[in-house]
Amino acid sequence: MIATTLGSGAPSVMPSTGWLFEQVLLVDDHALFAQGLAVIIQQESLANKVVIVPSVEAATDSLVHRRGFDLVLLDLTLDGEAGLSLFARLSGHDGVPPVVIISSSDDECTVRAARAAGARGFLAKSASRAALVRMMRAVGQGQGYFPGGVTPLDADVPLTPRQLDVLSLLAQGFPNKRISQSLDLTEHTVKTHLKAIFTHLAVHNRTECVNKARRLGWL
């Protein structure tokens, strides 16, 4: 049985046996979708408990103070807030479980941005039930799960993980202010990262930067 209230009320699913995950945190502000997804997770015996929260702030509080989660399923857009900002909020905290993005937007740039931010996997909201099961089983086995064509980032890329985050959001057309909000950085820090990226790529503007990064396989 699933509770109907989102947030700290912690809707949960409690099937009987054979769990893949003990406790999953589902971060989504669309109640019907979230509850429907929790039902499927229950029916497929993928998790003993699914806790639903509607915001990055609530997710951060749950992960930092409650702990005990084995997996996070994270929507990218939460009432105007960028879901990827969760990675910045959890930076420096130990014991953070793998995060999989569940999004209605599944274009290549979005998928790569999620991967660069640190997501373990990505699943479109339009995906089938079977795809959900495959994704959760893959992540449960310590593997990544991304749509075809998204390959691991090249270890020789001369950018820091944070610079890759900035580059990926830049490729989505985010202005500096939105990049700073998504990554919990100051605009000055974003500009510093962009200057370093431009220097590495020997480019002079954002369009040249994105185009060259794609040619090099950095995006």
Image: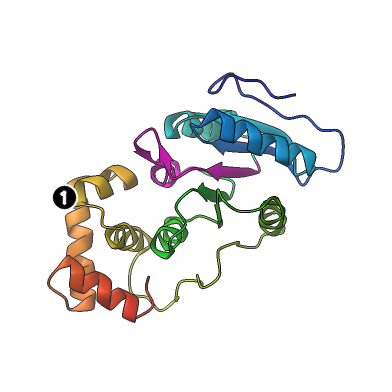
In this view, 36 is above or below 1? below
Is residue 190 in sight in this rendering? Answer: yes
Quadrant of the rendered structure where residue 204 is?
bottom left
Is residue 68 in sight in this rendering? Answer: no
Residue in the foreground of this view, choosing between 135 and 164: 135
Q: Residue 78's x, y, as percent?
A: 42, 36
Which quadrant does the N terminus fall into? top right
- Does 164 lie within the magenta span? no
Q: Residue 19's x, y, as percent?
A: 80, 43
Residue at coordinates 67% horizontally, 59% vertically from top-left?
142
Residue behind mark 1: 188
- Does 76 lie within the magenta span? yes
In this view, 27 is above or below 98? above
Q: Residue 25's x, y, as percent?
A: 60, 36
In the displayed image of the protein, which residue is found farthest to the right?
Answer: 17
Residue 178 left/right relative to 131 = left
In this view, 200 is above or below 75? below
The amino acid marked with disc number 1 is His
Residue in the foreground of this view, choosing between 170 and 163: 170
Which stretch did the figure color magenta?
A: 70-93
Residue in the foreground of this view, choosing between 23 and 92: 23
Residue 25 left/right relative to 201 = right
Question: Which class describes the residues within 10 Å of circle 1: few (<14), some (14-19), or many (20+)?
Answer: few
- State how many labels appear: 1
Q: Residue 217's x, y, as percent?
A: 38, 78
